[in-house]
Image: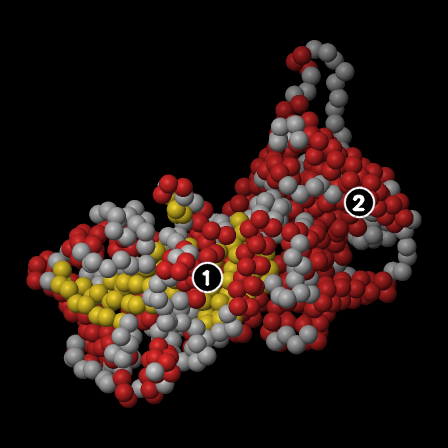
Amino acid sequence: MSPRNSKKPGALNVCSYEAVSNSTTLRKISNPFLDATPFVTNLCSAILLIQLLFLLFHRLPRFFSELITGLLMGPMVLGANALFSEYTHPVRLTGATETLTNLGVIYYMFLVGLQMDLTTIRRISKGAWGNALFGILLPLGMGAVSNGKTRAFILPTLAFILFCWFVLRPVLSQIIDKDSSKGGNYSDLCINSILTGVVVCGFITDACGSHSMIGAFMFGLIIPDGELGRMIMEKLEDFVPGIMLPAFFVLTGTRCNILAMFYNINPFAVLGILVLACLAKIISGFLVAMYYGMPVREGVALGVLMNAKGVLALIILNVGRDIKAVDNQPFTIMVMTILLMTILVKPIPLWACKTTKHFRKYKLRTLQESKPNSELRILACIHTTRNLSGILNLLELSNSTEKSPICVFAACLVGLSGRTNAMLIVHDENRNSSGQNYPPARGRTDADQIISTLENYERRNQSMSFLPLTVVSPYTSMHEDIHNLAEDKRVTFILIPFHKQSGAEGMQQENSSIRLVNQNLLTKAPCSVGIFIDRGLSLKIYNEGSHRREKLNFAMFYTGGHDDREALTYACRMAGSLNVSLKVMQFLPGKEAIEMMDMEEEVEGENQRFVDDMYLNELRFMTMCNPSVTWVDKSVNSGDEIIIAAKDLADEYDLYIVGRGQGMIKPFALGLSEWSNCEELGPLGDALSTSDFAQHASILVVQQHSVSTTKNKGMPQHQEKAGLETWKSPLSSRDLLNIVNHRKKTDEEDD
């Protein structure tokens, strides 16, 4: 080990000596596995440490754990131990580590280009363009002040990029289409040729004087979207980030020496550099956000997100060190700056979201707690065109009026496939209706047709406003996007289709992906949820020709509990429509049912019935002038008797409305849960969906947004605890005095 002739302190040239035997005797030949052991140990140690740190710091991005792993295995911590250093990354194996690192970087950038969807750029608003450009140009200008030199490699690299886009991309598309047309599948030769082309393109840009990652990224960008890109990602997305990139982080960590970062520099100056390096992008993003009228806290959060760095920033830093543009000291400072930026990514945006989203008055976002003369916001989820007609007709029957309008956020849900990134598309009047806005697997077949139908429907219904949306997301996390959308739009009710569809000859077609979304949404929804089983409700409205009926018959089965109260609230709202006749059947526990309950269950049932009676008395008073609403009370002792009573009804019903069953007393639930196949429908909803007498009727199952304690208007807490049956007249409520029976008004006008 000899000192290097340099004025920079601490710079050394390291030479390693290795004994080489020329003998052909087997016992004298060195074992190649012994040389490979440190390399394998180094890689395995890095992978294991990354996983452990990610489990420990799971709230931070994975990049944080990877970067900390590199620093821990560097010369400051584990690398300071001579034994660990000798058996993990000895000097003689530095070349092998750098080779694996370069390959990992090349294929990582290829995956970045392969996953990029350029069609999203067309939908970027002016504010986003301005924020992105200003956030790039300001730091770039600050760097250009100190170094205004140009490089000769720019022209050949630019020529290669243009060649790839305008020449290689069309040729590659034709070759891939020809290969897939033979049998619909791509051959191994095609896939292996593309993986080889990644290295070739990297070599070309490296020969041009720039880095090989540029060629790999450009090659991934020109790969046509579709099945081929998905197959390549399946082969590389686990191997490259999980096996090859850890070597890159270890190499970065070995080049960092935190103590040397303060050599001959004031520590406060180093801290100032760290802070200023973080503030450049944050300030630029914040100023643009202020220019476009964004809130202050959201502007700060946007600046922090724009300031976030990742693997690409580390790659560029290592390239700068390789070409001796930066020394070890500034290299370490910039790595620590990236680490600081990564730590700030999660807490500051979360702080901004918590302080800007004031949902206190929307804590109980339920239909029951909504005021009668207020806007009702509904998030209607649509998976396919088969869900469209039934949901639209259910919304039309929801009695949208001038005093209580309905605002519908119609979300077309598209399963994530191919390279398309998860995104939310808000459609306006000037939207581009070309199928390129949607994932190629669906294209215009479903998403574009759904959005077009919604826009035409809004033009015909002035009392109901629609905002068409497209949510592109994996089915495993689609419920989170629906949750966030409902929270941002302050929605009161989410309407989702059932996962089974009636097919040919009455067969049920089940979609397990939609069922997963429904189950997750019922668990984590921020408001009330309704599952709609459509069995031709639209056909009964529009396809009866000259024998069109004046009214649709709806039935509400009330067994008690907050879900049933929510369902009854929605049913009574629908009863205000001119085309709806509603029968509310309340099932009360009989003598045998009461005897089946123990003391605790009986007390709980009494408290539940007290709350139910309070609410039912209000609704009975509100609908006493509405001849289309009838009330029937019936005593039953089990869930089976509920089904028998429902079956004995002579009338034919077009829609059954029930609660999901939370709060149902035990004797009712036991008889129904024995035949339950779909938990998301609840015991009564599932029994109706499989019954013979309701096989041609649509079903709406409602779940109220869960709350910690039961609250009731007009009932003091001490009376609730004591169980005092006091009833406050609805005439004392100012909101109830403003209720208008639109059917009665229409009848008076006709007279």
User: Which residue sits at x=64%, y=51%?
Assistant: 435
Q: Which of marks 2 and 1 is nearer the N terminus?
A: 2
Horizontal placement of 501 versus 598: left or right? Answer: right
User: Which residue sits at x=86%, y=39%?
Assistant: 207
Query: Residue 696 appears at what percent x and percent y?
Result: 32, 51
Q: Mark 2 points at which residue?
A: 165
Among the 4 quarters of the image, the one containing residue 23: top right
User: Which residue sits at x=67%, y=72%?
Assistant: 289
Among the 4 quarters of the image, the one containing residue 291: bottom right
3D distance between C-alphas at marks 2 and 1 = 45 Å
Closer to us: 252 or 147: 147
The quarter of the rendered structure image containing the N terminus is top right
The quarter of the rendered structure image containing the C terminus is bottom left
Horizontal placement of 100 versus 623: left or right? Answer: right
Q: Name the residue under label 1.
A: 392
Closer to us: 680 or 288: 680
